[in-house]
Every structure is written in C-alpha cells, then in structure tokens.
Image (cartoon, coloured by chain):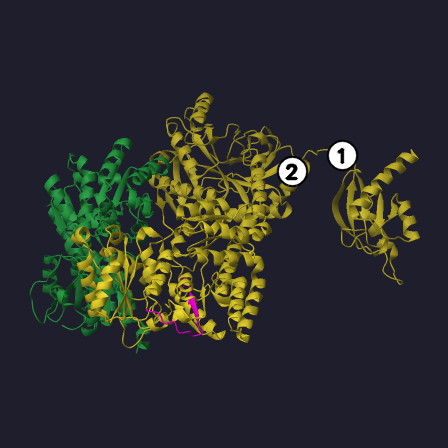
Amino acid sequence: MNESVLKERESSICDRRESSRSISCERESVSGAVSQRACVYCGARVVLNPITDAYHIVHGPIGCASYTWDIRGSLTSGEDTFRNSFSTDLRETDIVFGGAKKLTAAIDELMEKAVPSPKLIFVFATCIVGVIGDDIEAVCRLAEKKYGIRVIPVKAPGFSGTKSQGYKLACNAIMNLIRPHAKQPKRFGVNILGDFNLAGEMWIIKGYLEKIGIPVISTITGDSSYKTLIQAPSAMLNIVQCAGSSAYLSELMETEFGIPSLRVSFFGIEDTTASLLRVADFFGKMEISENARKFAAEQTANIMPIIEKYKPHLEGKKAAIFVGGGFKAISLIRQFGELGMEAVVVGTQTGKKEDYEVMSSLVNSNAVILDDANPAELERFMTEKQADILVGGVKERPLAYKLGMAFCDHNHERKHPLAGFEGIENFVKEIHKSINSPVWKYVC
Amino acid sequence: MLNLNVNPCKMCMPMGAISALWGVKGCMPMLHGSQGCATYIRRHMSTHYSEPIDIASSSLTEEGTVFGGEANLLKGLKNMIELYNPEVIGVCTTCLAETIGEDVGAIVKKFYEQNSTVKVINVASPGYGGTQNEGWFVAIRSILEQMEPNKQPNGKINIITPMISPADTRWLKSFLKEMGIDYILLPDISDNLDGATEKHYERLKTDGTSITDIAAMAGAKLTIEFSEFTDEKNSPAEYLKETYGVPYVKLSLPSGASGMDKLISVLTEAGGAPSDEIKKARGRYIDAMIDSHKHSAQARVAVFGDPDFVVAMVWLCCENGALPVLAATGSISPKLKEMLANETEDCRKFHFAEEIRVLDDSDFSAIEKGCVELGANLLIGSSDGRRISRKLNIPLIRCAFPIHDYIGGQRTRILGFDGSLCILDQAANAMMEKTEGSFREELHEKFYKPQTAKKAADKTATHPCFGEQACQNARVHLPVAPKCNIQCNYCLRNYDCMNESRPGVTSKILSPAEALERYIKLKANMPSLTVVGIAGPGDALANFDKSAETFRLIREYDQGVTFCIATNGLLLPQYAQELKELDVSHVTVTMNAVDPSIGAKIYKYVQYMGKTYTGIEGAAILLANQLAGIKMLSEAGIMCKVNCVTLKGINDHHIYEVTQMAANLGAFMTNIMQHLPVKGSAFEGLERVTNKEIAVLREQCGANIKQMTHCRQCRSDAAGTLDRDVSIEFRESVPEKPGPEKFRRFAVATQTGAVVDMHFGQADEFYIYESDEKNARFVETRKVIKYCNGPQCENKEERWNSVIHAISDCEAVLAVRIGPTPEKRLKENGISAITTYERVETAVLQAAKEKRRNTHGTA
C-alpha cells in the first residue's frame, strides 16, 4: 500500500481482491492518523441526549458542551429540555481546587430555578474531571438524596476508550435509571432500542408496529422521557435497531429483566420488510403476522414505482459508505443493491468483528472494507474505486465534494427521515439529486 | 445561572488555536489530547467553511493519561509526516494534556532536533484557559515566539487580525494592495478555508502565510493589530515590539465609516494612499447609510460574539442610528463594558434609551433574557443565536463563526465599506421585512378591529334575544320563508292565527319587496327597531334566495340594522359563508339532540339534496350539518344561539349534552325552551315540561354556556319588543316627538371645510353646523345651485329658491362676503348674514354667541 496508508493501519483495511482475512477493529485510534471518530464522552452523550425531559449537565470545561449542544437533532413530542446545553464551564481555578463544589452548586441552582423542575439529571464527567479527582458519584448520590429525584453520573472521560465505550456507559446509565423499576408485570408490547428519532424516524417505526398490532412500551432513547423509560422493564421484547449503541443494553435487559431481543433494521425495503415480519412472527399470533405481511406488501407496492422511476438513472453507479456503526453500513450495502448500485468502499467508525464479516459477504470481490478510516484513506480508495457518491456524516461531506463526488448525509444533521418506507423515497431522491446534478459537469 | 453555563456563547481555546494554524502555509495542526476534541472541532469547522478539515489527534488513551502522552505524541507526529508531508506542524494542547502536566515544549523540541525538516510549533491551549478568541491570539503569538527571526528591515507592515472570515481576509488583502501597502498578514486563511475545486485535491493546504514571511515580521516597520482586547501576555504586536522593536498600532476591526477612516488614516501615515476606487467605495457607503437611516433607526440590536467583533458591530449600529440594546461576549472581558460605555452614549441619548446592556463571560440564556427585557428586534452574531431567533421570532444576521444552519459561512462579510454594507443592507431589510409583513395586520388590528368588535358587541347588546338588557329594543320577524326541509314532530306550520303566538305561525307570507315595505313602515314608527330577523314560518335557509334578497334590500335602505335568522341548521354548512357576506351577525339554530338515536324520535323526516331520509339516518345527517354549521358560524365570527326544545321523555335527559356540545362548537348561548304542545302535531299529546324543570335545566347547563332566560317563543311575523308584539297594530301612527331646541344652526360657505373662505354667491354647497355656544358640531353638507353665476347669470329666482330651501333651518349664513341684495333677501327669510375669515368652528361659536345676545337684546 502507498503513502496514504500508515503501516499500523494496514490491518484495519481489507481489500477484497487481495484477501478475505478478518479485519482488525474495536481498538483505539492510531495517533496522528486523523481518525473520524469522536470520543467516549461523545458516545455516551449521543445515546442519552434524546431523553427529552432530562437535564444533561456536562461537567468540565466548556468545549465538550459547546460542540455537542443539540447535536442530534432528535425530535420530541414532549419537553425540549434536552435541546439546551448545560455545563459547569470549569475554569483554571476549578482545575486547581477541584470542580465538585461547583457541580453541587450547579445542581442546587437547577433545582431552585429550572423550569420545568428536573426529574432526571445526567452528569457527564469529561476528560479532566477524572484527572482532577472530582467524586461525581458522591455528588450525584447526595443530590438524589436531597431532592428525591434521579441524578445519574456518567463517567465518560474522552480518553478512556473509544466511542463504543461511551455507548456502554450510556447503556449502564439507562440501566441505572430503570433498574429500580424492574419488578413490573409484563405487558404485551415491545421496546424499541437504538433509534434516536432523527427526523422522526422513531415515530415512523412506532407507527408501523402499532399499525400491525404491536404496542410500543418504551422508546430508547428517541423521544423518550423519564416516565416512558421506567416502563421499559414491562415489555415482552426489545427490538434493537442500532446494535452498536444498544446491543449491550439489550443484553443487560435480557439478563436482568428476562426480556429477549431481536435485531432489526428499518433502512431499505428488504431490511424494513424482514424486520417487520421478524417482530410480528415473534409473538406467534396469526393476526399480527398477517397484518405485517399485508402492510409490508402494500408499502412495497407503493414504493416500487418510485424506485423503478429512479433506478435507470442510478443503476451501475458506485457508492462509498462511511458511517458510524456496522448495522447502518450493512443496511446501506443492501439498499444500494436494491437500486442497482454497487458499494465499492465500506467503512465504519466503530463496527464490530461480526459486522465486518457480514459486510464482506455482501460486497463484491473488488470492494474495500475499512475500520476507523481517515481522510487520506477515504480519498485514496474512493478515487481508486471510482466511487460516484459517498454516504457519510458532515465531516466527510466536504472531502467528497472536493473530490468531485456526490454525497448523502446519513448522520445527525439531516432533516428528513431515511428509515422506513417513507425514508426509502427520501433516500432515492437524495441520491439522484446529488449524483445526477448538473454541477458535476463543470468540475474538470 | 451562576454556577451553570446554559447554552454557551463560546467555544474553547483549541478551536481558535487550530483556526489560526490553518492560515499558515503547509501547516498540519494536531491536538494533543483525546480523540473527540479533534473530531468536534473538525465537525464545527467543516460545517461552517464547507471545506475538508483534517486535524490530527494524538488520541490519548488511559495509559497515556496516567503515564504521560509523549509516546503517543511522537508517534502521531511521525504518522502525520508520513500522511501529509507538511512543512509545519502546529501542536495544540487540550484540557487533558495541560491537566496531566505534559511538557509539550520539551517533547516537541526533542522531536524537532531529530526531524529538522519540519518546523514544529507548540501552542499551550487548555480548553479551560479561555475561548476560541484567546486561543487564536495565543497561537499567533506562539508562532512568532517559536520562529527563527529575520530582522533585516523590509519596510513591510505586519497585519494581525482576530478570527475573521476567508472572504473578509481576501478583502483585507486587496484593500491593502489598493492602498499601496506592502504587508505580511498572519494568519492568512483566505484560501485554505475557502478553497477552489481543482483537478487534483491537495490534502495539505498550500496557501497561507509562509514561514519565510513569518520570519520577516521581525524586520517590519509597523504592526497593525486589529484587536483592542489583546494584552501583553497574548498580543502578537506587543511581542514584536518588545522583542524586535517593531512599533505597533491597535485598531478596532475596520467596519463602518468610523472604523475604515481610522484605518485609512493609519495606512496613509504609513506611506499608503487611498485610491479613487476606495474614495468612491466610501461615498457609496455613506450614500447607503443615508438611504437606510430611517430603517436602521428602527433596529434594536443584540450583538454577540468575540469582543472585537462585538465592538465593530456595535459601532456599525451606532453610526447608522441603530440602537445596540445588548452587546454580549462569551469571553471574560471586563474591558468590553468600559470601552462601549463612552462610545455608545450618543446613540443611547439619540434613542432616549435607558440602557445599553453589555455582558461579558455570558451565555445564551443571559442573552435571551436581555433580548426579552430590552425588546431586541434584530440579532447579529453566529448561528448559535438561531434558537433565540426562532423562539422570540427575531431575525438573525449570521456573520460570525460558527454558522451551521446556513451555507456560506466562509463568505460572510463585515469588513470594509462593502462588508459593512452587507450588514447594513441585511439589517435595513430585516426591518423593512418586519414592517412590510406586519403593518397591514397591525393597523387593522389596532384601529379597525376594535370598531367592528364594538359594532358586533353593540349588535349583540341591542339584540333583544341575545342581550338580556336589550328588552326595550324592538325586532321584526319578516315571514318570507315558507318552506321547511325537515318535519319536527312538535311543529305545525299554519297561517292566519292572529291570536296564536308561537314559532311557525304567520298571518301572511311576504315577498322580499313587501318585506322591505313592512320594514320601512315599522322603522318609521318604531325608532327602537334594531333587529330584522327571518324566522320562518319554515326554515330561513330552505328559502335562501328569498331570505338573501330580503336582507339585501333592507341593507340598501338601512346600513345599521342587525340581521338575524333562525334555522334548523341543515343547510348551514352550505350557506354559512354567504350569511357572513350578507352581514347576518346573529343566527339561532334549533338543535334538539346531539345523538342521532334521540334525534330520530324528534324528526319525522329530513329532506336533503333531493332525497328524504327518516329515522336515525335522517337525524344523523341533520346533526352532522348542525355541528359543522355551528362551528363554521363561530369561526366566521357570527354569534350563534342554540335553541333546544325540551321534550318530556324524549330529550329532557339529554339537554346537558346538547348545551355542552354547543359550547364546544363556539356557540354564544343556548335557549332551553319549553315545549308548547300544538294541536295537530305529532307531539300534541306529549306532557309539558314544567317551568320549574326548565329553570333547573337552565341552571345546570349554565355551567356549560350562557343561558337565555327571557324567551317568549315569538311568531314568525312578530314585530316590536319581546313583551309587546305590535305586528298586528303597526299601522297605528306614532306621533312625532318634538325635540327641544337648544342648538342654533348655521350655514357656512367654505371650500376647504377649515376656514370660512367663500363668497356667499359662489358657494355650491354649505357646511351646516349647529352650536350651543360651547361646541360647534358639524351636521352635514347641503348642495345648492350657485347663487351667483357670473355677470350674465340668469334664472336667479330658481337658484335663490334652491339656496333658501337648503338653509331655511339656519339662523345665519357665514361667508367671506355677501352682496347687499342677497343679504336683504336672507333677512326677509329670518336668516342673518355674517362675514368673517375665521376658522369655521370659531366663526360658528362666535355667531352663536352673537345670536343669543341679539335675541336677548330684542327681547
């Protein structure tokens, strides 16, 4: 491999032409390699942030709060407390003398002044909090006692692992929240895990399930609230959309509450249909299964003409995929397949070994698979494989554009749903609008 | 809040440090800390600039944190060189690196000794040490401190800016060139953060200030630093002065005429000269200031951002006559208040404003509070203000970093004459947009609506059925609507029952023309007649053409009378809009049930769209239309009364629900009526509900909606007050009542209506005034044939008669002049002539007083 790939990174890249060996993943980023990943704190923050009525206090200097303020664009049907940024904004003196006092004072002030009055507070400890030795667990414990509300510490110093570690911390925090409510009678219904209601996607999925006759008890964490979350232990099934962030939570809930789980994906026709049927069949009720089949067939029939309309303009085009987690990458490979397109570069920030195995099996033999890729690698492989479009997040967008390549945003900042049958239409249209835009003719 | 930053108006030091490094040629920045810092800053910058932003991270791990990050940092530097082959590497620290006490300087020095081809600069930028603004200057200062200087005098001018946009940087460069200034700009982000699309994408940024140029800054003749907030610790200019003796000037950012004039004068002193093009640009800016000044004066601006940006924008506001109500920065900057206090004083006085609030170390919760308290109507700053903008509906001019919800952050302009114009135009347009978008509605709301609302309220207050205090007012029911489209089991429509007073009864059906005639006659005899209603004997809407025609005719005759109808509601959805257009302000709908199974017992049939429905089906159709219709009425602002006939054993247990529904639909009141069994009707044998029972029902339902308690169940041709129906006797003549004469009338010859300014003979109309000596009240104008038509005027007699007829009730004529003949003839008719040039009202008052004296005199 040439100058665009560091030696240390070679094992995290798998060119399907050269080998089918398994990829090296789930490890820390290489220093100086310009990873696209964020940090432990970020992982915890993005999973918990959609809890609408929680006060998310970022304990640390201002940067971490400033850069994650309202980061997800999750929609809410209730409070919008979560869209504010609360930070203890630690300064030099706090670093020297400790910030625990300031945190306590901040919680006191919130309890005194904040409207609506807090029922649930998460306290995120960032990098230096651990280093300066603030005992945030003690602060939270005391506050819980004093005010009779839940104050949950999330010790997420950025350096303590990868973003995935942050997901785990968030899952632990959720367990911390719902564990006291473990003893509830079971009800017919499911929890949806790992959807964050970007552009209302949780509402779409929830709508589907309710339509085929399956009540949704708790959504984790898209459009959730303290009240809805604590009902989660009563569900009969967890369905897990974003496995990267929530598989761990589903495992904990299975062990502690005996709730089995199913992995689902609501991206693309195949995945959406398969997921609906899988969930429906789980309950072994004829009526629900039939509803699901009928519903999926109807929706597919509706969407097919749209796909057929755009397909001739997209067939044969090549796509590069670089997204956060493995589940989304896998869905996207299939979704491009449905459009007659081919995924030539596939990468994720935090995919797991199993994810990469699935990806390998889905792509053609000339594709490249990357874990925790950097801009140099993306540039090289997208150019080499002659990708027509990149699917990724906002950081990757300008790179694609500089390389004269179309782009589809599959991250926090989009304002239209890409999940469900409704999302398929948006996806196809977006791909078309970018890939077949006249602007590319002017690029030399 | 004191202990909590709520919605930050700042970012951290590394953000500024990295941004500054982006303006150094061939430089790759690196953050020594955990992975997230680099990623967040990359995301923030790439969204704002729409450019790929590569920032390396030393990706500190748990181990690095505990045992020191040297190994990570060294490996990172090596990897970066391999990937990017940079000329310069800028290593910025983070909270974490500083807190664990990393000696980055030593590590970097060690590395540099082994790899002398790459210049490595280290910047101490702990996140808690300040905001991006402080980080920016610390980075520039570190670059200068760590360069190998070239002290050879070069006659150039060093230019240092705070964080400005690439477009403003490009402008600054071309402006300096235009002024004939040889300069070194540090940093120069103009191309690196706003690059062109090129055939081969260059990963490493090759524009920006070169290391050679940076070295030469030690030999410059002057430094201009566009910041008034740097101090001896972080000011690059002060460092160059102290170390190499380069003198410096600190200026505010060159926005507006005042900012630009200062800069031009400094540059002129330094050997430059403003070109004609610059002078023209200045002229255009002043011209635009004048064009916009009244719009600018409407603006109450909240400015937020870095201190230098805030100062520049506040100045721009002040010189244009906009009021900067709030100036806020997230930086700790007590100096800001002090600086702005004097400079904004004139502006504050100009606006008679009590306060110009200056906040430092601020956050958006404080800014939001300030916007509300100080009535801001325009925001200037970064797109982080968008939430306030949405929440408070205040437009936001996005012109500072970061801009995440708009495109073009790299192209925003605030500097120079044309940059200032960008802001000025946006501000003026925001004000114009606001006015244009709201003035029609606001003025309508303020001046028109209260009148119509009062009229509507008056109509309700004077309607004998709707207003309880209006019993003395009379109404007439004009029986123009014979047909009905439903059959109620309690109803029997017949005529000629002079002695029977109940709904459905009339002596005669009138045509619309006859109805008008009856109205005219009644009105003449009954001045208290304020309401015309159509209440059958069938359904007013089932005979809509007749009803509408009647209303049209009467409205032509009388603009003020209130129109009402009574209907079963079946056709309401069809005609609600037309009723509004006919100016029907009050409608009574008889709705006896809101449950079709109950309705089925009350209605024998319902005829709708050419078909006859019975039973539940019929009742359901009727009900659906009643519900939709009442809602439409209330939405159209028509007062709706719901009548409900209480039928023993049929709907008497259901009245509460009916009234509840009526209230929900927006009805004004309900009238729970006693059933009066009519012989020959289906319910003739139904037992009556007692008065007492009705009273109880009304009391219960009063919880839902206002109750009518004074219903008299009128005939379809009733006329008069509720208690005194004169429909049969209205032919009796009512004697005219003589009014006491306390006002004297005057005819005024005036053209303008303000001053007595016409000759008597020239007037073709007279303004008639009356006066009791205290007030002069305009009555009306009266047309006459001009008395004098020039020298050859004929038919004088005819004209004279026209005049004398028109003003016969007046005691005097007020004119500028009057001929002796007409004066004499007027006198013969008991009208005196007064000549005057006074204001009309004054003249009338004087005349009235004079008249009294004369009358008393003669007496």
What residue lies at 79% left-to-right and 40% top-to-bottom? B771
Q: Which of the two labelled residues, at mark 1 and mark 2, occupies the earlier sequence position?
A: 2
B301 w.r.t. A138: above or below: below
Label 2 chain ID:
B
Q: Quadrant of residue B547?
A: top right
| Amino acid, disc 1 | Gly
| Amino acid, disc 2 | Leu
B609 w.r.t. B285: above or below: above
Viewer-nearest of discs 1 and 2:
1
In this view, the residue farthest toward the bottom is A444
| Residue identified by numbered label 2 | B522
Q: Secondary structure at mark 2?
A: helix
Label 1 chain ID:
B
Q: Residues within 10 Å of mark 1 (few under 14, many from 20)?
A: few
What residue lies at 41% left-to-right and 68% top-to-bottom? B169
- Which chain comes out yellow in the rendered image? B
